[in-house]
Image: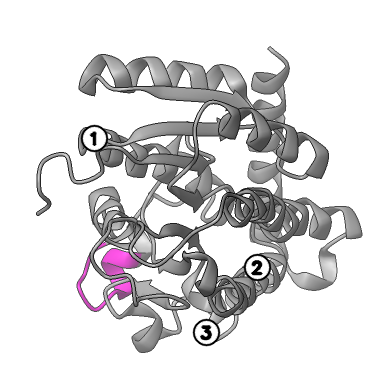
Amino acid sequence: MFENKLMAGKRILITGGGTGLGRAMGEQLLALGAELVICGRRRGVCEEAAAQLTAKHGGVVHAYGVDIRDAAAVDAMIEDIFAKGALAGLINNAAGNFISPTEALSPRGFDAIANIVMHGTFYVTHAVGKRWIASGWRPGQPMRSVVSIVVSWVENGGPYVVPSTMSKSAVVGMTKSLAIEWARHGIRLNAVGPGEIPTEGASKRLAPGVTPGTRSRENNPMGRPGEERELANLVTFLLADGCDWLTGQVMMMDGANYMATGGNFYELRKWTPEQWQSARAAIEEQNRKDRAQRTA
């Protein structure tokens, strides 16, 4: 689909780049010649991913451990990255989500999502953007590009995932606002809202006990979930040179699901208290395993 070495000479930062969709996007960019910087809360996971990716594709992958909820830690990481070479692109991929009746949410539960998705995405974008602006830009030079991964339900609401809906809507607002404000600095910002693309982490928090992809096979107009390569292809296009006038856009890639079905979690209104209790237990168990991995 793309020219060989399309991304040669570009350094791309991917938050949440050690696993799932972040890793899949990074693998394609690396194969097309980009130099990658991946970060996540578990540095060991990112280092392992970096080693595996370079063993498979060659090239250069830098790994950082950072909690993007910490603005000072984010700025220190970005300072170190730029000291080694300027970035050409940023993928805001790190996120968190889980299903819950909104009345059952605690402030801590809400903040767990909002601090990663809204605050963290802004901290990273701000730290990168201000360094791009300080470095200067003039017409004719390559533009710099930010792609943020959002969700389709920013368009039509997300019952039972209200913290994610609110936070991703804020990211959409940031994308559109900064596309206008930073255009004169040679910076483009776009967002992609993928539908269900099964990954281990998301599946266990959004559909505990359900085989990944089941909902899409039953309800999606195309009769299937999405594939990692499809998201990687769209994001590669948005990061590449050649369509510099494309900025401030939010593209939904879900097989027309959100238009046909709402593309959200409305069907969970039918769950019994016992089903919610089982789902909460499964999510809490997954969170416990994640905490154990981070401290191991």
Q: Which amino acid, mark 3? A: Glu
Mark 3 vs mark 2: in front: 3
Q: Which amino acid, mark 1? A: Gly
Helix, strand or loop at label 3? It is: loop
**How many neighbours does mark 3 have within 10 angstroms: few (below 14), some (14-19), or many (20 or more)?**
some
From the image, tell me which residue sits under label 1. Answer: 33
From the image, tell me which residue sits under label 2. Answer: 161
Dot 3 or dot 2: first in sequence order is: 3
* Whole-percent x, y for residue 108 in the image: 88, 53
Which picture quadrant has residue 122? bottom right
Q: Nearer the viewer, residue 172 or 181?
A: 181
**How many neighbours does mark 1 have within 10 angstroms: few (below 14), some (14-19), or many (20 or more)?**
many
Which picture quadrant has residue 200? top left
Alpha-carbon span between mark 3 and mark 2: 14 Å
Q: CB atoms at circles 3 and 1 under 8 Å apart?
A: no
From the image, tell me which residue sits under label 3. Answer: 155
Dot 2 or dot 1: first in sequence order is: 1
Rendered image: mark on residue 84: none
Q: What is the span of residues highlighted in magenta in the rendered image? A: 216-224
* Whole-percent x, y for residue 242 in the image: 23, 65
Helix, strand or loop at label 2? It is: loop
Dot 3 or dot 1: first in sequence order is: 1
Does residue 77 belong to the magenta stretch?
no
